[in-house]
Amino acid sequence: AQSVTQPDIHITVSEGASLELRCNYSYGATPYLFWYVQSPGQGLQLLLKYFSGDTLVQGIKGFEAEFKRSQSSFNLRKPSVHWSDAAEYFCAVVPRGNNLFFGTGTRLTVIP
Amino acid sequence: KAGVTQTPRYLIKTRGQQVTLSCSPISGHRSVSWYQQTPGQGLQFLFEYFSETQRNKGNFPGRFSGRQFSNSRSEMNVSTLELGDSALYLCASSLTLTNVETQYFGPGTRLLVL
């Protein structure tokens, strides 16, 4: 079945530590890939996107993501987390010719 | 450039009533999509409008409907509200059809059905 999987429901990291949020997808062809962040009570803000080309994508707020075709993954990373990064993170895909499908989200807690 | 705006931000209704939510896209954007976000079901696609025509529709009952005006502003309507319709309704806009373009989201309208 076609799906977007974020296996980690909740992650806790210390401020200054590195972060990796996982995202796997299951679609026939490589879809367009996105990461969005949602702060409490807010809408979704685009962090970064991958359509084609360089598999390492730089985004806003110091985030980056790497597309790995062999693993059908698009993991989000940040080398040093700030307290303001605490939020919910959503991986999303647009299968070619289709609409936006979201993963279930990963809630990030940052410990001072 | 102003972002996507949604009105109202909060709404309380009772079962059986109907509700209309409004979305103004980013200037120049012609596509508007609507999503429902609930703790149980997550983010689910409702429908997409482009050039005043519904282009895609998610798996929601006919009680959920929408429209788009010539200035690209969009409204969605939910009739005969049920408790399960309580959710955050997000609107997103993009330059063209969303299968090739990035979507930008508004802050959402939080609907509570009592």
Image: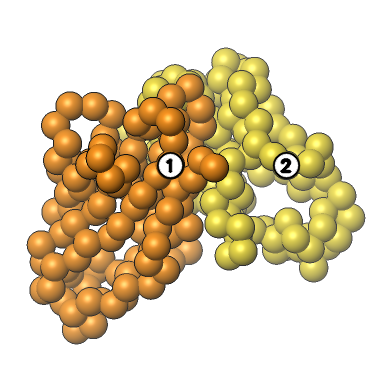
Rendered residue at 48%/57% (across/down): A104
Residue B4 location in percent, x, y? 45, 39
Pick the residue in front: B41 or A15. Answer: B41
Residue A71 location in percent, x, y? 28, 45
Q: Which mark is residue B60?
A: 2
Pick the residue in front: B78 or A28. Answer: A28
| Residue B75 in sight | no
Instruction: Name the kind of residue labelled 2 in the image.
Output: Phe
Q: Which mark is residue A26?
A: 1
Instruction: Name the kind of residue labelled 1 in the image.
Output: Ser
Judging by colour alone, the chain drawn in orange in this rendered image is: A
Quarter of the image holding residue A109?
A: bottom left
SS state under label 2:
loop
Note whether B77 is above or below A110 in the view shown.
above
| Residue B52 in sight | yes
Left or right: residue B61 versus residue A14 is: right
Single out the mark in the foreground, 1 or 2. 1
* Chain identifier of the residue bearing label 2 in the image: B
Rendered residue at 59%/29% (across/down): B48
Of the chain colours in the picture, the one used for chain B is yellow
Left or right: residue A69 versus residue B29 is: left
Left or right: residue B103 versus residue B44 is: left
SS state under label 1:
strand
Picture colour scheme: by chain
Quarter of the image holding residue A83?
A: bottom left
Question: Which quadrant would the C terminus of chain A be assigned to in this image?
Answer: bottom left
Q: Residues within 10 Å of mark 2 (few under 14, many from 20)?
A: few
* Chain identifier of the residue bearing label 1 in the image: A
Pick the residue in front: B29 or A26. Answer: A26
